[in-house]
Structure formats: C-alpha cells, structure tokens
C-alpha cells in the first residue's frame, strides 16, 4: 500500500499547518485552546468521545451530550465515523472491526454543524473520518463549512478504516485506500488554501476549480490508526495523531516511536499534536491516572470514551462525565479561562 506511486508525485508537498499557525497561536486562543495546567506540564485539552453506539441513534441525545460536554467544561467532542454497518457472518473476506449492522452512527459533519449552532466553545474532532471511501472535494466542502459555521472549531482526523463493504457501497477501492488517502490529504490542503486548484493525481482530477467559501484558516488534518504505515504517513503528512486505547504505557511507547519519526524528518515535535482516546479500565480514579500520565508524557489532547461501561442511557453517560469533570476540576478551570477570554473581548 505504502509502495504505491502517487499520481501527484510531482506536485509540491503541502506543508502541515503547524509552522504557519505557530505565531498566531502564541497570541490568540481559540475555543478550548487555553491551558489546563501550569508549571512544567504542557497544556492539554480534555474531551469526550460521542457514545453513539449506545444511544440508539436518538437525535435528542446529540443535543444533550453536546450541551453537557460544553457545560461540564470539556474542551472538545470527538466522533467516530461509519456510513454503513455490515453483517459479519458468512463472508469469504472477513470483517475484522467491532461494528455491525446493529450499531448506529451519525455523520460527523452533519452532527458537528448542528452542535456548532447550540454551543460556543467546544471543539469538534473527527476521530477518525474514513477519508478514502469519500469524495475528496466533497469532504473539503463539508469540512470547510463546519469550520466556518463553528468559528474555526474543527479538527479533521482521518484514517483508512477496515470495512471493505462500506468502500464497495460508496464506489471506492478498498485495496488502494492508503495511497488514496495520501493523495487526498495533499489535495485537501490545496483546496483549503489556494485560490484555484489545478490537480491531476492517480485518484482525483480537479480542472482549475475553487473551493468557495474557503475556511478562514487551514483546517488541521490529523491521522489515526496503528502500524508502521500509519505512523510513517502521519510523520510526513499530518498535523497530529490520534492514538486509540491500549493503556497509558502502550500509548507512551507508541508516541515515542512516532515522535522520533517526526523529528528525523526535521519537523517540530512540539507542534505535532497527539490525542489519546482513553478507554477507562476502572473507576474515575484510574481515568485520572491515565490523564495525568498522558499529560506528563507531553500529550496535547485526551478524549474520554464512555462506551462499554454499562451506563445504559443518556443520563448515565452524562452523570459519568459529570463525575470525571468534578475529579479533574474542569468547570472551575474552564470558567476562569473562558470568562477571562470574554472579558478580554469586551475590554
């Protein structure tokens, strides 16, 4: 997959946006960008994974969870992505992922656009969007609009996925997904920033066309996944990486390997984001230990999973998040930061 030659190989590699946004980040803080810690520890944003497989596709749950995440002081809401859930049984080519025809998923772009209208502060992250099964130009349009309508609150996390049934249903080739994603990331960056794009690649052709309106900033593109191919791709092309589960010791070890790759390519490790999607193994005390461990390791983001804990209802998920927020003093910290930012805006 990684050895495929991209049709756009002769195109200049778009630069990940860390360098161009570094100066701005020093002087302005967007929603959820304020530090959570002081002293030697690096600032880290704490968010929540939307528990959509346990909410039955209930539209009211989207509003309640989104509002609760903001009101409780979390920094962002991360959403997984699947367009279709497939039957696993009796397939010559086995499906290896966890989701089936019974698991509900909302489209993350549509959900985030809705939540952008009823929230003010929290960021939104796709974690991850299965990019190669989608049309690149359409993803650019959808992502740009979510970012515009939310006031610059989108983080676009992308990956290659595992469900070949989805790929077939959406008219894309599962076998070339890695190479396609590489080309798509390059094209997305050009569509987000260039007045007119003329692009000829292996998978996409854009004949002197423009994305209008464009996002007000280059949207950050993060990668997720596992394995050497994903790490190699992220080190070269991404603004950050989303790590999924495995426990703090495992994630710290994996981050160290990816960090070395980023540094070996001459890129700034400091500007490369890292989000740990943490699956609680015990109570809130165990979760806070994971949060502290990831912060100590230099994590920039952490996203808390509430699925698989037997919470059973929207109220159960919100009550659990409230206990996490209390243990981490999120409302007090966010109130100080957000209130101060609003005073500064008025003054």
Image (cartoon, rainbow, N blue to C red):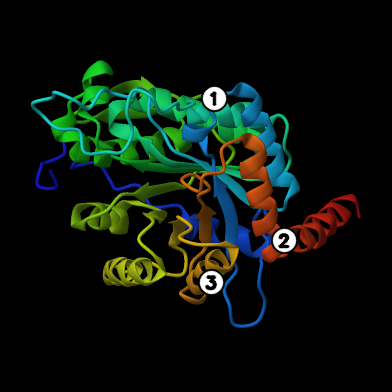
SS for dot 3 = helix
Side of 83 relative to 212 (left or right) = left
Side of 236 relative to 107 (left or right) = left
Earlier along the polypeptide chain: callout 3 or callout 1? 1
Residue 9 placement (x, y as % from top left): 18, 42
Earlier along the polypeptide chain: callout 2 or callout 3? 3
SS for dot 2 = helix
The quarter of the displayed image where residue 85 is located: top left
SS for dot 1 = helix
Q: Give the residue pinned by disc 3.
A: 289
Residue 32 appearing in the image: yes
Side of 109 relative to 30 (left or right) = left
Q: Could you give the CA–CA distance between mark 3 and mark 1, rounded to whole angstroms?
A: 34 Å
Q: Could you give the CA–CA distance between mark 1 and mark 2, rounded to whole angstroms?
A: 30 Å
Residue 118 placement (x, y as % from top left): 73, 31
Categorize mark 2 by other alpha carbons within 10 Å: few (<14), some (14-19), many (20+). Answer: some
Categorize mark 3 by other alpha carbons within 10 Å: few (<14), some (14-19), many (20+). Answer: few
From the viewer's side, name the closer residue of 294 and 52: 52
Q: Could you give the CA–CA distance between mark 2 and mark 3, rounded to whole angstroms?
A: 14 Å
Check whether the beta carbons of the residues at disc 2 and disc 3 lie within 8 A of each other. Answer: no
Q: Nearer the viewer, mark 3 or mark 1?
A: 3
Q: Give the residue pinned by disc 2.
A: 326
């Amino acid at each position: 997959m990684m050895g495929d030659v991209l049709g756009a190989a002769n195109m200049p590699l778009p630069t990940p946006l860390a360098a161009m946004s570094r100066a701005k980040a020093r002087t302005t803080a967007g929603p959820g960008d304020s530090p959570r810690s002081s002293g030697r520890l690096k600032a880290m944003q704490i968010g929540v994974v939307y528990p959509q497989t346990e909410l039955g596709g209930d539209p009211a749950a989207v509003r309640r969870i989104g509002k609760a995440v903001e009101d409780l002081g979390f920094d962002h809401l991360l959403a997984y992505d699947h367009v279709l859930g497939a039957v696993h049984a009796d397939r010559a080519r086995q499906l290896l992922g966890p989701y089936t025809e019974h698991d509900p998923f909302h489209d993350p772009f549509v959900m985030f656009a809705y939540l952008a209208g009823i929230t003010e502060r929290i960021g939104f992250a796709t974690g991850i969007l299965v990019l190669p099964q989608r049309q690149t130009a359409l993803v650019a349009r959808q992502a740009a609009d979510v970012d515009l309508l939310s006031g610059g609150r989108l983080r676009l996390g992308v990956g290659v996925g595992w469900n070949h049934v989805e790929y077939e249903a959406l008219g894309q080739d599962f076998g070339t997904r890695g190479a396609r994603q590489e080309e798509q990331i390059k094209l997305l960056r050009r569509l987000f920033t260039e007045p007119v794009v003329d692009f000829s690649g292996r998978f996409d052709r854009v004949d002197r066309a423009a994305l209008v309106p464009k996002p007000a900033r280059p949207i950050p593109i993060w990668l997720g996944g596992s394995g050497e191919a994903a790490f190699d791709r992220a080190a070269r092309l991404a603004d950050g990486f989303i790590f999924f589960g495995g426990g703090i010791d495992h994630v710290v070890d994996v981050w160290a390997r990816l960090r070395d790759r980023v540094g070996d390519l001459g890129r700034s490790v400091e500007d490369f984001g890292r989000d740990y999607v943490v699956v609680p193994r015990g109570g809130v005390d165990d979760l806070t230990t994971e949060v502290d461990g990831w912060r100590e390791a230099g994590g920039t983001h952490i996203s808390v999973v509430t699925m698989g804990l037997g919470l059973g209802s929207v109220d159960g998920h919100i009550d659990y998040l409230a206990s996490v927020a209390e243990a981490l003093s999120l409302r007090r910290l966010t109130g100080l930061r957000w209130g101060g930012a609003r005073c500064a805006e008025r003054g």
